[in-house]
Image (spheres, rainbow, N blue to C red):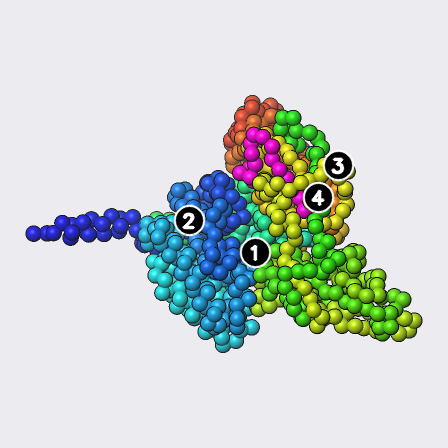
Amino acid sequence: MVSLRFLVCCLLFLASSVYATIVSHDGRAITIDGNRRVLLSGSIHYPRSTPEMWPDLIKKGKEGGLDAIETYVFWNAHEPTRRQYDFSGNLDLIRFLKTIQDQKLYGVLRIGPYVCAEWNYGGFPVWLHNMPDMEFRTTNKAFMNEMQNFTTMIVDMVKKNKLFASQGGPIILAQIENEYGNVIGSYGEMGKAYIQWCANMAQSLDVGVPWIMCQQDDAPQPMLNTCNGYYCDNFEPNNANTPKMWTENWTGWYQNWGGKNPHRTTEDVAFSVARFFQRGGTFQNYYMYHGGTNFGRTAGGPYITTSYDYDAPLDEFGNLNQPKYGHLKQLHDILHSMEKTLTYGNVSTIDFGNFVSATIYKTEGGSSCFFGNVNESSDATINFQGETYVVPTWSVSILPDCKTEVYNTAKINTQTSVMVKKPNEAEDEPINLKWSWRPENIDNFLLKGRGESTMRQLFDQKIVSNDQSDYLWYMTTLNLKEEDPVWGKNMYLHINSTAHVLHAFVNGQHVGNYHAENGKFHYVFEQEAKFNPGDNVISLLSITVGLPNYGAFFENVPAGITGPVFIIGKNDDETIVKDLSAHKWSYKTGLSGFENQLFSSESQSKWSGDSVPFNRTMTWYKTTFKAPLGSEPVVVDLLGLGKGTAWINGNNIGRYWPEFLSTEDGCSTECNYRGAYYAEKCQTNCGEPTQRWYHVPRSFLNPKGDNTLVLFEEIGGNPSFVNFQTIGVGGVCANVYEKNVLELSCHGRPISAIKFASFGNPRGKCGSFEKGTCEANKDVVNILSAECVGKEKCSVNVSAEKFGVPECDGATRSLAVEALC
């Protein structure tokens, strides 16, 4: 007789096996339950948005044609203090992964735990650096123990929630380490041993899905090595039995304080993707698909901005970045329609010369073709199977049946959305906010030089502060007599500094400040100062603006005032130098306003509403405001301020620095998509603040009642210009080729008017369209007005039957439209 226990065990096994997903790979593709897949993924980092935003962001990813969502795991966010963990709020990794699962998408979990990601210290906690005998990313026992502890903890959490595909969850791939191949040469044989240890450690965790290593040409088996970059069509995996995978297709680039806004054209991103799949790729991930915001002190660098928009298909606030989002969605749909041919078909190539080629994927059921033109200056006319095709410069045409072109990367048929900022229309909201203020209490540091610890040495800021704050005071008292050799008519304070920003005080008087520029974070600050006979208090405030996140041994890049520090006396032709580096230095981490949480909604501190000073250093400002009406994303305009930090209802929305302007040169109103992209190729915002507007997530706001904005201003600014705005679609435009479909959408708002429409050979671009030399014989504006005005979205076939026949003498015909929302 069969026992009841045996029956229960069998039922449990069957139940678990029904839902388990088998993820494997061969030389062609990732296979899921035995089926080869074309997989399109997008990076969305959970800490760079809010839990309230996650469902919408992931839903838009799915609607945009993604199969998977990728994220890093951020060690220093989750373990800010050794063995003390935080998975609350926007750090709730499990909730994020379950949100992916709710949308029936796959997940790619890049544990690292080194992540780079323009994230503070590359994701490493600074306490790790301060452990005895510590070396990062090499065969260092202390480092490997800590790395294994954190990685194991993350894997165990994910297993406990049954989120690996082998358990029926969404995660089909996991990553260990990150871009180590870029720096492995600096670590020698220890680097090779370390990467082998990483592979063994990861494999021992038995996650039931493949592990990947990006940018790691010598990735040990069974790790899958993958490619990162703007283009990966030339990449070949190190094992012929593993698929060609692209873990980071950079959809744009990040911003630095003092830098310009980078943009990567829609045509070029689409070209890179199509070219990758033309040449045998089957898994591709966009970095980023949604960039988001570096809230709090999470931005790396130094000097990475609070915005991490990245010119991604979804902008910082979660809006569709059109036409990039829509043009890629169309590409994804076509690639998915060809999935079986691309992953099972026999491949052949025809070289037409001059960097033009055709790739044919053929199965018994049919064929699919790519025509690629990598020439940067000329279109190509080719003859294929008795038909003539024109392939524009730097583009790929896709013919799912090898007969009809249905997509070309350089021909955009999706709308461009013109985003506009609108004033806060909340009821009873005053035009000018009413401010109160209070000074940062720095007297103890300026006049007494008292700190928390004292040492006869200048230490790196990371060692003293453990990165608990951007701010660290270095203070010493110097007793001078008039007969001292350094005493002179002209005396100077000379500081060799690696502080990102430095403020210097002598006897309570502000001597001067300095911030590093152009990537030169090791500099000399020298300023004349007034010293007195007797005791003199020298107070130096070192400020970091994000710790380094990339490069070999980046953890050892100094920050703070590492010296030497001199007093220089000059008398006529004589110069005397007094070295203060070995003096008794007192240290204090942070500022009193931060310790007293003046930014907190619960703070009971007193503020003054009288004679609010402007352009005053080290000053706190506070105001209340009503939440903007509606559901559109909210931003706060901080133009007029200098540098500091902002909080909304106690939530740190990040560092601000609108005083830091980009240089006047290097921008262009036109951006040529042709040719290889690089970060400086298509820049805007020359001579303007690097970042003026700052994201305020709706979940940070009280929809009813007052909200509080608190600013800490370091260098002096005028808060009277601060105001809240919403961001929405103000208008849309498109130029759609004949035999395609025009789709217009105002994203929740009605189309109010057709401002311009022409079917024929219209000229110009969005915002400046004009009629060409031939025009349809019907009233195109009236036709589109009837089809679209008053609706949130509309679709219209672009054809001569619809709009009339233009006399264009064989020229390519298109429909240009501008509509108001």
Q: CA distance from mark 2 to mark 4?
A: 41 Å
Q: Which residue is drawn at the image coordinates 91% and 73% (left, top)?
A: 573
In this view, 553 is above or below 638: below
* Res. 438 mark: 4
Q: Residues within 10 Å of mark 2 (few under 14, many from 20)?
A: some
In this view, 507 is above or below 755: below
Q: Nearer the viewer, mark 2 or mark 4?
A: 4
Q: Nearer the viewer, mark 4 or mark 1?
A: 4
Q: CA distance from mark 4 to mark 1?
A: 32 Å
Residue 567: x and y in percent read 79, 68
Pick whichever, 261 or 237, lies toward us.
Answer: 261
Q: Nearer the viewer, mark 1 or mark 3?
A: 3
Magenta span: 697-713
Q: Which residue is drawn at the image coordinates 76% and 72% (left, top)?
A: 579
Q: Amino acid at mark 4?
A: Arg
Q: Is residue 251 visible?
A: yes
Q: Which residue is mark 3?
A: 610
Q: Which residue is mark 2?
A: 94
